């Protein structure tokens, strides 16, 4: 199934968490002056116009980046994230939202290599336009979870792998765990970011337990919810699972997630998690 298009959801509360974590991890990894390999297994089109018909249909960005845009009390890395998005808008008005490929390409340097996978034909074409012949970047219209395995371990011996499926198919919660285990076997010291939605909590519980028994160490979990779990249709929360996180990340998220839950939550029903899912000292 390849019907999902992120343009309808760009900049929503889930993107706030996902891209805030991505930014913090990339910034930390770039404190070392050594080349980095970045892999995005579900890259999407890479750049989104918030005045497009897709974004305007449900205006989900108003409950995410739109709620933070004009505030002057943003704590810690929330402020870093919003400032970064502002740099990519050419006026004070919020009209553009970057996807993870654009965020990574803006932050990474000339010595770094970037690999973007996108299976959706139309999204892949748009992604190629965003890349615009950047020699650091290679794009593939392919299954990133399967094909990125061949890139590991990278010659740089340093890498960040973002896994951001749509979860259109129920068994993707199992598929991503199986893929992570294989990727980790090839490159145990890499940093892995796995995004997940909460639409049926039992699937998330299964995925967490599968990771806890996978043999993979040093896993942290960060979740932001805007309303309580529900059996009704729709995403009530989303999260990021981070394998081999920077040692600074847990404290940063524990500082800002309570504020985000209160600010973006519906009717004071926001909630969050920030915890060590599987132990071992984070990367330093």
Image (spheres, helix red, strand yellow):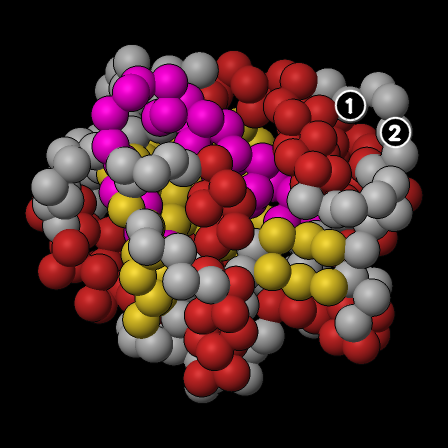
User: Mark 1 packing: few (<14 Cα in 10 Å), some, or many (20+)?
Assistant: some
Residue 74 disc label: 1
User: In this view of the protein, which residue sits in the foreground, 144 or 241?
Assistant: 144
Stretch in magenta:
13-40
Q: Is residue 224 visible?
A: no
Query: Pointer 1 and pointer 2: residues touching (CB < 8 Å)?
Result: yes
Residue 264, above or below 130? above
State the residue at coordinates (11%, 41%).
Answer: 155
Picture coordinates of residue 199, whole percent (x, y): 60, 62
State the residue at coordinates (29%, 20%).
Answer: 33
Seen in the image, is 57 located left or right of residue 109?
A: right
State the residue at coordinates (45%, 46%).
Answer: 105
Q: For residue 284, which quarter of the picture?
A: top left
User: Mark 2 packing: few (<14 Cα in 10 Å), some, or many (20+)?
Assistant: few
Is 22 within the magenta? Answer: yes
Query: Secondary structure under badge 2?
Result: loop
Query: Secondary structure under badge 1?
Result: loop
Residue 83, above or below 43? above
- Residue receiving disc 2: 71
């Amino acid at each position: 199934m390849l019907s999902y298009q992120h343009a309808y959801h760009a900049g929503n509360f889930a993107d706030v968490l996902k891209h805030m974590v991505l930014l913090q991890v990339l910034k930390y990894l770039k404190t070392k002056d050594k080349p980095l390999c970045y892999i995005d297994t579900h890259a999407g089109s890479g750049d989104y116009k918030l005045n497009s018909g897709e974004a305007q249909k449900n205006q989900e960005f108003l409950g995410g980046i739109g709620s933070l845009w004009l505030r002057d009390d943003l704590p810690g890395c929330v402020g870093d994230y919003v400032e970064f998005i502002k740099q990519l808008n050419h006026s004070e008005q919020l009209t553009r939202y970057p996807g993870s490929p654009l965020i990574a390409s803006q932050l990474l340097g000339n010595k770094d290599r970037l690999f973007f996978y996108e299976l959706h034909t139309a999204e892949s074409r748009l992604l190629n336009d965003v890349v615009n012949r950047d020699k650091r970047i290679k794009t593939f219209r392919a299954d990133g979870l399967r094909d990125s395995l061949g890139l590991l371990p990278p010659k740089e011996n340093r890498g960040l792998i973002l896994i951001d499926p749509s979860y259109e198919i129920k068994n993707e919660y199992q598929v991503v765990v199986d893929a992570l285990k294989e990727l980790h076997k090839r490159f145990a010291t890499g940093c892995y970011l796995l995004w997940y939605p909460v639409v049926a909590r039992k699937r998330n519980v299964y995925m967490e337990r599968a990771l806890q028994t996978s043999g993979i160490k040093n896993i942290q979990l960060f979740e932001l919810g805007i309303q309580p779990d529900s059996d009704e249709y729709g995403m009530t929360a989303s999260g990021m699972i981070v394998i081999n996180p920077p040692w600074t990340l847990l404290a940063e998220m524990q500082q800002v997630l309570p504020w985000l839950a209160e600010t973006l939550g519906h009717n004071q029903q926001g909630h969050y998690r920030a915890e060590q899912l599987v132990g071992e000292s984070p990367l330093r």
